[in-house]
Image (cartoon, rainbow, N blue to C red):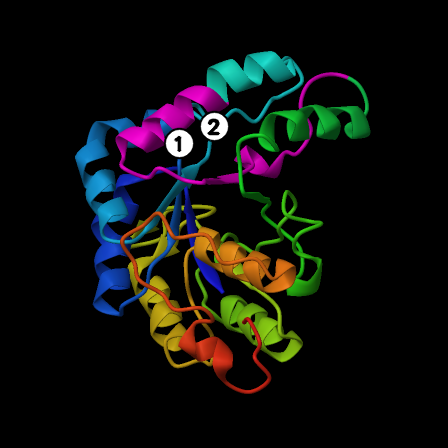
Amino acid sequence: MSLTYDDGLNSQLDNVIPDLDALGLKATFFLTAENAEARLPDWTRAAEEGHEMADHTVSHPCKLRRYTAADFLSREIAPAEGFLAEAHDAGPHTFAYPCGMEALGPGSQWQGRARYLADLKPTFLAARSVDGSPNDPRRLLKSRFDLHAFEPTYDHDDPRLGFAYVERAIHAGAWAILVFHEVLPRRKGEGDTSIAVHRRILQWLVRQPVWCAPMRNVFQWVEARETGAPPAPFQSTQSLSFPPPSAKRGRNRVG
């Protein structure tokens, strides 16, 4: 499974990374460059310590019909990739769709989706949405730009939906990706998670039979297993074996 955090928020640096590191967990942070640039040295330190810095565009646009593929690439993706390089994450990077919107520009949903993929495929290893069932590793290479995820505390500050989603992935031999935004002393509104609930989720996870790693690490391991190719070296400083020790248990599942 993978823990992911969207938008490059100060609360993630202050309240999330210390708790992750205390438990030996590494996560994926989808940085919005405009949010993250004020604390670039802190994000650089996180990347150097083994967390994945990933692409969530420059300005997090949700209204996409006015963009052409060329505009979106030049205004949102290319500068964000430059920012990630400044943060000492050389890639290959993963991507998270801002607002979960997967169609770019005018026309039908199919046309918008094709336009978006034309921007993503040359640049990114994979892309994550914000909903859907846990990912089947056997179909991963065909759905790499539509990876499912779940926001367990978006509507309610309660860890139980997250527990249930990960348990579902364990039983199916699937890959669960959880999404968080602000992690604060107290939940203030929609999308927030309290520090206490976030800690309960992390503490529960480390007791489960899962390999918890950044999205890039999991995807590259599954890709190597499915293709038979040697695994690509991780760009982070985190050292992981292939397959990871927890994946050797039971039926050699990826949870």
Q: Is residue 156 visible?
A: no
Q: Which residues are magenta?
A: 77-106
Q: Residue 195, percent across and down? A: 30, 59
Dot placed on the residue nearer the N-terminal end, 1 or 2: 1
| Nearer to us in this view, 135 or 192 | 135
- The answer to whether residue 111 is left or right of residue 46 is right
In the rendering, which numbered label is found on residue 23?
none
**How far apart are the alpha carbons under marks 1 and 2?**
6 Å
Q: Is residue 68 above or below residue 54?
A: above
For the image, the number of numbered tags is 2
In the rendering, which numbered label is found on residue 32?
1
Q: Please say whether residue 79 is one of the residues in the magenta stretch.
A: yes
Residue plotted at (18% across, 35% down): 41
Q: Please say whether residue 44 is one of the residues in the magenta stretch.
A: no
- Label 2 element class: loop
| Nearer to us in this view, 23 or 158 | 23
Residues at marks 1 and 2 touching, judged by CB atoms closer than 8 Å: yes
Q: Is residue 51 above or below residue 160?
A: above
- Label 1 element class: loop
The answer to which quarter of the image holds residue 125 is top right
